[in-house]
Amino acid sequence: MNFKNTLLALAAASVFGITANQINVQRVVADGVPYVTAGQSGLPAMDVVDIASYQGNLSVDDFNKMKAAGIKGVIVKLTESTDYTNPYARTQVDNARAAGMKVSAYHFARFHDENGARAEADYFANVAYSLGFSSSDLMVDDVEDNTLIKDNVSNNARVFNDQLHARGFSDTALYTYSTYNMDRSFMSNDHIWMASYPYEPSSDHLWNTQYGMWQWTSNAHVNGVSGTFDMSVDYTGLASRDSGYRYVPEAGGWRWVEDGKMFTGFKYYMGTYYWFENGVRSDKAWHEAWGHMYYTGADGRAVQGVQNINGQNFDFGSDGTFYMRSSGYLYDGSSQNGGYRWYENGQLYTGFRYYMGTYYWFVDGVRQNAGWREAWGMKYYTDDNGRAVQGTQKIDGTYYYFGDDGTYYERGGYLFDGSSQNGGYRWYENGQLFTGFRYYMGTYYWFVDGVRQNAGWREAWGMKYYTDQDGRAVQGIQTINGQTYNFGNDGTYYLR
């Protein structure tokens, strides 16, 4: 940056033989900064390089050599004042992106009042957008011109920063040097890029660790690349962490990257949430996150309010939460059940739900077809179409009765099963052929393996009974095979 052509505040404990807390500040010309080479041992890290027009048309190969030397981020000077744009900016930006580096931008400040600060921020923003920078990219205000100090530089820098935010850039930073006379409190320390050049830079004596980045040299060389460069340690990943919405040449376009990896999930960007699948923005699709369902529209943005999707209306609220409130049998594009699932207040539902004239059973929103279900203390059966059945049903070779009154639960009982015995009826109990007495149509009947037994003696509950030719347990005085018996008249039916 231009800072390297000004007088710099340099400290060197090794020269003066004093502790870090006793460092004397000296002023020397930048040309006295030691010449260093990327990859040289014992130096502070070279995480980020910043470049301007004097580096010219750096090639993709140049940036690849920087990347191979361990440099992760590139900060390109785009603009100065309201009338200068770096003539090499597009080439530098495009080639750095093509090399797969994180690319940020800076503006050299010349403003002397609030209007000038806003105008310069707008100029910077316009050029940045024209070069493909997104709202999540780092945008830096380079404040080092001493002529700005007398005109309330602190306030003007704050206005510049606010205007960048108003233009949609959420990640902004301030570049300056430690002795520059301004109030930096409007910017958090982790977004301050501090410049100061030691006489003897060393990885054992790092400076400005309380800030996001430290520019520690303006006299660095990268093997195989012409010229010298400013280099910085990036303590917080401000300009070197491989995250955000950026161009990834090897992936063939713009992708969301998180810590160097293609990201899957929601990310807040440009005022709403976007869903990314392996880094690719997902449009016109349903998504599950945080226990809710969301939908991203044709522009990739998570929708709000009432939306008509594939002919159905859904309510996504209007309070900035974006999740679906709707309930019912909804199309979500899933691979199961033809893309439909049952949602309850936006949650995938498990259990019975009444739909199209009967009950259906859902597990994690997916309709279940043929199978037994338990609910409300009863047993039910859903058929091949997922509908809860009624009446007499033959299931796996056994007959069951589910009533005919819209309750659908399995009762067992005297069911028609098409057998040759007893007119095709048999008694089932929990789906099993029953042996014993069962009360039916005003009296007791005796069944053996489900078949009603007619005339004959029976034993049950420690007593003896007799069923007549119609299978009914008899009462009163009865003559059986020429002998008289008393079976009572109190509805107990047993032999006295």
Image (cartoon, rainbow, N blue to C red):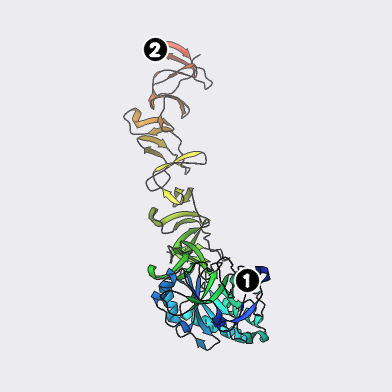
Of the residues tagged 1 and 2, which is closer to the observer?
1
How far from the left and from the top, in percent, is residue 286? 45, 61
Contact between labelled residues 2 and 1, with CB atoms less than 8 Å apart: no
Q: Does dot 2 land on a helix, a strand or a loop? A: loop
The answer to whether residue 303 is above or below residue 383 is below
Q: Single out the residue that lies furthest toward the top.
A: 483
> Quadrant of the image for the N terminus?
bottom right
- Is 276 situated above or below 389? below
Q: Is residue 168 visible?
A: no
Which residue carries the number 1 mark?
A: 13
**Which of the two residues, 419 or 20, is positioned nearer the viewer here?**
20
Give coordinates of residue 175: x percent, y percent: 58, 77
Q: Position of residue 93 (x, y in %)?
A: 45, 78
On residue 481, which mark appears?
2
Disc 2 crowd, CA 10 A, few/some/many (<14, 14-19, 20+): few
Q: At x 56% / y 81%, what residue is drawn? A: 30
Amino acid type, label 2: Asn
Q: Is residue 426 left or right of residue 308?
A: left
Name, please, the residue furthest toward the bottom: 83
- How many tags in the picture? 2
Sort mark 1 into few (<14), some (14-19) or many (20+) by Cα contacts within 10 Å.
Answer: some
Q: Nearer the viewer, residue 420 or 112?
A: 112
Q: Does 422 sit above or below residue 477?
A: below
